[in-house]
Amino acid sequence: MDPLGARLLAARIRAGVSVGTRIELVGDPADDSGLGPGDRGVVDDIDDRGLVRVIWDRGCVAQIDPEQTPFRPLAA
């Protein structure tokens, strides 16, 4: 595995979710996205820094940092 692949794998493991997982915010995000507890969406991507890009049910796309924004995966 090349270094980029290793970083991507480590970031996905650290995030605790995989692409396609539905999640729900359980706390306020660490940014000014306008999202809040109870917002739901689907994980679209996880970058090599561990940021999780989510397509939110509200119709927007925003990244969250799983180390600063509390969320939980939802059952399929």
Image (tube, rainbow, N blue to C red):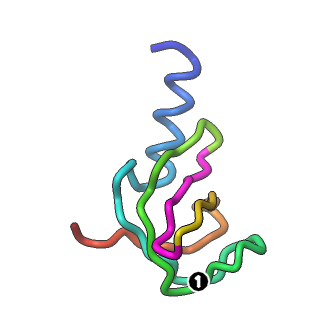
Which residue is outermost to the right?
32
- Amino acid type at circle 1 is Gly
Residue 75 position within the rendered picture, expressed as x and y whole percent measured from the top left: 24, 71
User: Count the marks: how many?
Assistant: 1
Residue pictured at 57% horizontal, 22% vertical: 4
- Is 74 left, or right, of 5 in this rendering? left
Q: Which residues are magenta?
A: 50-58
Residue pictured at 58% horizontal, 66% vertical: 60
Residue 52 position within the rendered picture, expressed as x and y whole percent measured from the top left: 55, 53
Residue pictured at 71% horizontal, 72% vertical: 33
- Is 51 left, or right, of 76 in this rendering? right
Nearest the viewer among 14 and 48 is: 48
Residue 13 position within the rendered picture, expressed as x and y whole percent measured from the top left: 44, 45
- Is 35 left, or right, of 39 in this rendering? right
Residue 39 lies in magenta, yes or no? no
Residue 52 lies in magenta, yes or no? yes
> Where 76 falls versus 6 (above or below)?
below
* Residue at which label 1 appears: 27
> Where 59 falls versus 55 (above or below)?
below
Mark 1 residue element: loop
